[in-house]
Amino acid sequence: MADNKVAPNAGGFFDDVSNFFDHAAQFTGHPTGLLNQIKACNSVYRFRFPIRKGDGVEVIDAWRVEHSHHMSPTKGGIRFSEMVNEDEVMALAALMTYKCAIVNVPFGGAKGGIKINPKNYSIAELENITRRYTVELIKKNFIGPAIDVPAPDYGSGEREMSWIADTYYTMNPGQLDAMGCVTGKPIALHGIHGRKEATGRGVAIATRECVSVAEDMKALGLTAGLEGKRVIVQGLGNVGYHSAKYLSQFGALIVGLCEFEGAIYNADGLDLEDIVAHRKETGSILGFKGARSEFSNSAEGLEQDCDILVPAALENQLTGENIGRIKAKIIAEGANGPTSPEAGAIFSKKGGIIIPDMYCNAGGVTVSYFEWLKNLYHVAFGRMDKRYEETSSMNLINLMEKMTGVSLSAEQKNLVAKGATELELVNSGLEETMIRSYHDIRDIKLTNSKIEDLRTAAFIGAIDKVAISYMNMGIWP
Ligand code: GLU
């Protein structure tokens, strides 16, 4: 039977998020009652259900927390992890509220958790657990395209999302928008191109935008631009892998990788795909030939020389204990809550920049929003206009050729006239969202010299947006 005791950090993570909130709230001037309403978790559903395992029965602990209903539906992933506890799910649900607000995704925040280590279960058992979890949510009206829309998180992915969609549809036959009940689904089951890589891609765009601001980089003693910047990534899961992939595509050098089994480092750069192949073959990143040094203690990997550190695994990785040894000048938070408040304060005081989780990893929920819209439209983005765009651009090119006497090659014409695919539209929407939001946050920071970091600025922006929703409901004058 699963251990029902809460994990050691219980009572900590939600408090951390609330403390960040309170600190930022001072700068907003909203009434205390309104701030308390924004901060509180509206609904916490804790449940248990039995599943058959081997010859016996196992009781599974699970949660779904809807943090804020200032907008509907609520939105957030489902974490499959042995470490899940109520405090963590509440904290992550709250972060979802602020995350959605900061990137202008019109959802309230939510999060789910199933307290299991997926590695200890067969695929059939995982399917059983996921379907039963979904049924429990349906019974209590905690899921639906207009109610609460789960997504992947640590330990879950497309496969689990397709089980959720199928279970929901089975229980709601004929519901036209049923597929909008969950995002992060496979393409073949009403998913959207670009969702899988969206969080990591968003982390890379956020980092690129941060380092593009010359005056901020000058203050750190760095040049502007990603070209040649040395990056250490923690976590080779979906977020870590894609962050590393796009950061190196944008010109950065991946010099270090940390996973739970250890860490590897090479100041001249590591080849990501080779590492992935090595890990697939041997089960570990250790022993990789392209590494100059390796550490059996994964945490040591974080402390190696680099410009940018991307913690993309779990919360509470950078603490008061190790932050002093971190050499990076920029921390891009791919994970939720990887930097403790104490560590964050020390790092910012030293002049370092933290690109905060609620913005930095918001690419996932941004593209989830696009997927949800696609499910409600019942048509893929670009399907109606791709050909039309191509034909009208081609007509224009042909006309220009006639008028100027200059002719273009077929290749040049296609390059100019090509209509956008769904993936291109999704990536364009993601890029616009990440770039705009970065400057929104930075601009808030610049309004007041007492706002010491981007996290505080991001919270201020998020609180203001949620507060405006409540005021528009007429709840507060
Ligand atoms: N679990 C992801 C997050 O923490 C994605 C949430 C979603 O797409 O709804 O942001």
Image (cartoon, grey):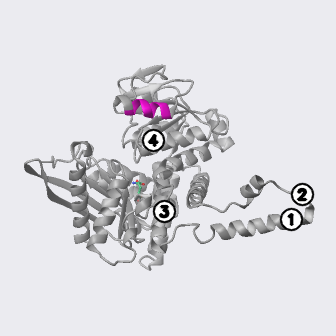
Residue 429 or residue 381, whichever sits in front: 381
Is 328 in the magenta?
A: no
Q: Position of residue 157 (x, y in %)?
A: 36, 52
Residue at the disc numbered 1: 400
Q: Which badge, 3 or 2, is on the more N-terminal residue?
A: 3
Q: Quadrant of residue 318?
A: top left
Residues at circles 4 and 1 in contact by the CB criterion of under 8 Å: no
Residue at the disc numbered 4: 240
**Mark 1, residues whose alpha carbon is within 10 Å: few (<14), some, or many (≥20)?**
few
Q: Which residues are magenta?
A: 273-280
Callout in the foreground (4, 1): 1
Residue 271 or residue 66, whichever sits in front: 271
Q: CA distance from mark 1 to mark 3?
A: 45 Å
Residue at the disc numbered 3: 101
Residues at circles 3 and 4 in contact by the CB criterion of under 8 Å: no
In this picture, residue 12 sits left or right of residue 396? left
* Residue 30 appears in the figure: no
Callout in the foreground (1, 3): 1
- 209 over 130 or under it: above or below: above
Q: How many marks?
A: 4
Q: CA distance from mark 3 to mark 4?
A: 24 Å
Q: Which badge, 4 or 2, is on the more N-terminal residue?
A: 4
